[in-house]
Amino acid sequence: METQNNLDLENSLKEFEAKSQAEQVPQTGDSKSPQVPTMVGWIMKLSGGAIKEQKTAEYILLAIAVIVFAISLYFFFK
């Protein structure tokens, strides 16, 4: 009785492995290209081509955040 259960279990495992290998999702070509965050893309687009690198756009966003924070501190403590 145990041998039959073991054989059934082994057959089920082999069948599961075969199905799981067949059902693997192929990767799309988009994963090869680096993704640009949305706000960085906006900065690059709105600059009219002046900002071409992602790192530069990130620094521009950081500068905008610092300026907005400084202005809010000015009005808060005024």
Image: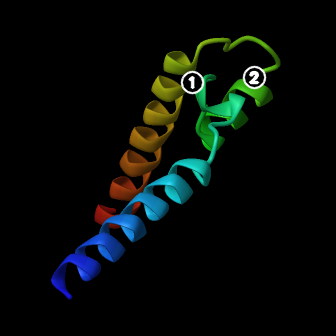
C-alpha separation, residue under disc 1 versus residue under disc 2? 9 Å
Dot 1 or dot 2: first in sequence order is 2
Residue at the image point whose x is 17% and y is 83% from the top? 2
Neighbourhood count class around disc 2 (C-alpha, 10 Å): few under 14, some 14–19, many 20 upward: few
Quadrant of image for the C terminus: bottom left
Which numbered dot is residue 47? 2
| Residue nearer the viewer, 27 or 11 | 11
Is 62 positioned to the left or the right of 7 in the image?
Answer: right
Neighbourhood count class around disc 1 (C-alpha, 10 Å): few under 14, some 14–19, many 20 upward: many
Q: Position of residue 66 (x, y in %)?
A: 39, 40
Q: Position of residue 63 (x, y in %)?
A: 45, 31
The amino acid type, in three-letter code, at marker 1 is Ala
Q: Position of residue 36 (x, y in %)?
A: 61, 32
The amino acid type, in three-letter code, at marker 2 is Ser
For the residue labelled by badge 1, is the local secondary structure a helix, a strand or a loop?
Answer: helix
Quadrant of image for the N terminus: bottom left
